[in-house]
């Protein structure tokens, strides 16, 4: 796997705004979507193109388009939904495959409880979206599920990543690339990323 920490000035600027303590739900939502778009731009920069002819005002001209079955976006419930609009802004025709994962209170293991995947996911690049890569449990469970469904090409887009989560995902799925706006210090005792963003799901949905 490779880790891509995106150092584009727009990404860093928007991430700084996202970290602000007093940010409205509206602004947090908007910035989450915007950084989601910028991560999508980076994560699709090597998609294969094919040549074709387009009819222009001057007659046929050479053009290029993305080859093959393209993309499915995979938001992990609930917070992943916050990045969805940003991804679809750049890839409006992408299929959306929704995955739900919760953590069992006794075993503390992530359990997948919802799955509605694109029927042809085995032919698509899956862009998994979740704002926070903390312990990595949910992301690993989601990738397990996607691979079981036949998905062969998977990339993860997260706003902020903890080294612990990166390590866990890399160990379980070395073939999955991770795109993030920041690799932060690490996790605190409650499992929150430091400095992170706080509870991203609550901030996106305004349920704090
Ligand atoms: N989930 C969050 O929303 N924030 C964290 O810091 C960790 C997990």
Image (cartoon, rainbow, N blue to C red):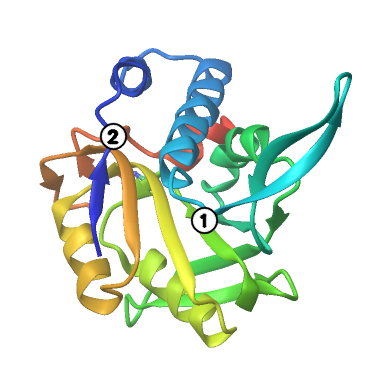
Quarter of the image with the N terminus is: bottom left
Residue depicted at 32% across the width and 35% down the height: 198
The answer to which quarter of the image holds residue 159 is top left
The answer to which quarter of the image holds residue 99 is bottom right
* Alpha carbon separation for disc pair 2 and 1: 16 Å
Residue depicted at 27% across the width and 68% down the height: 169
Residue 162, compared with residue 159, is above or below; it is below
Which one is nearer the viewer's eye here, 169 or 55? 55
Q: Residues within 10 Å of mark 2 (few under 14, many from 20)?
A: some
Q: How many marks?
A: 2
Residue 69, compared with residue 44, is above or below; it is below
Residue highlighted by disc 2: 6
Position of 87 compared to 208: left or right? right
Image coordinates of residue 133 in percent, x first then y, are: 32, 52
Q: Residues within 10 Å of mark 1 (few under 14, many from 20)?
A: many
User: Would residue 53 be seen by someone viewing this image from the given angle?
Assistant: yes
Q: Residue furthest front?
A: 59
Residue depicted at 32% across the width and 82% down the height: 107
Image coordinates of residue 68 in percent, x first then y, are: 66, 63
Residue depicted at 31% across the width and 72% down the height: 175
Residue highlighted by disc 1: 127
The answer to which quarter of the image holds residue 8 is top left
């Amino acid at each position: 796997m490779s880790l891509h920490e995106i150092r584009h000035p727009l990404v860093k600027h928007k991430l700084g705004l996202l970290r602000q303590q007093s940010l409205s739900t509206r602004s947090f939502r908007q910035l989450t979507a915007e950084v989601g778009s910028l991560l999508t731009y980076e994560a699709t920069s090597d998609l294969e193109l094919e040549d074709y002819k387009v009819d222009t005002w001057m007659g046929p001209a050479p053009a290029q388009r993305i080859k093959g079955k393209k993309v499915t976006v995979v938001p992990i419930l609930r917070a992943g939904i916050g990045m969805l609009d940003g991804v679809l802004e750049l890839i409006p025709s992408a299929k959306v495959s929704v995955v739900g994962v919760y953590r069992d209170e006794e075993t503390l293991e992530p359990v997948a409880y919802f799955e509605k995947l694109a029927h042809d996911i085995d032919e698509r690049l899956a862009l998994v979206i979740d704002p926070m890569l903390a312990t990595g449990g949910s992301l690993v469970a989601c990738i397990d599920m996607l691979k079981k469904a036949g998905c062969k090409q998977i990339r993860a887009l997260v706003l902020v990543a903890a080294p612990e989560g990166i390590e866990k995902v890399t160990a379980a799925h070395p073939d999955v690339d991770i795109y993030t706006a920041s690799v932060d210090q690490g996790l605190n005792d409650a499992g929150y990323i430091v400095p992170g963003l706080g509870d991203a799901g609550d901030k996106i949905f305004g349920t704090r």
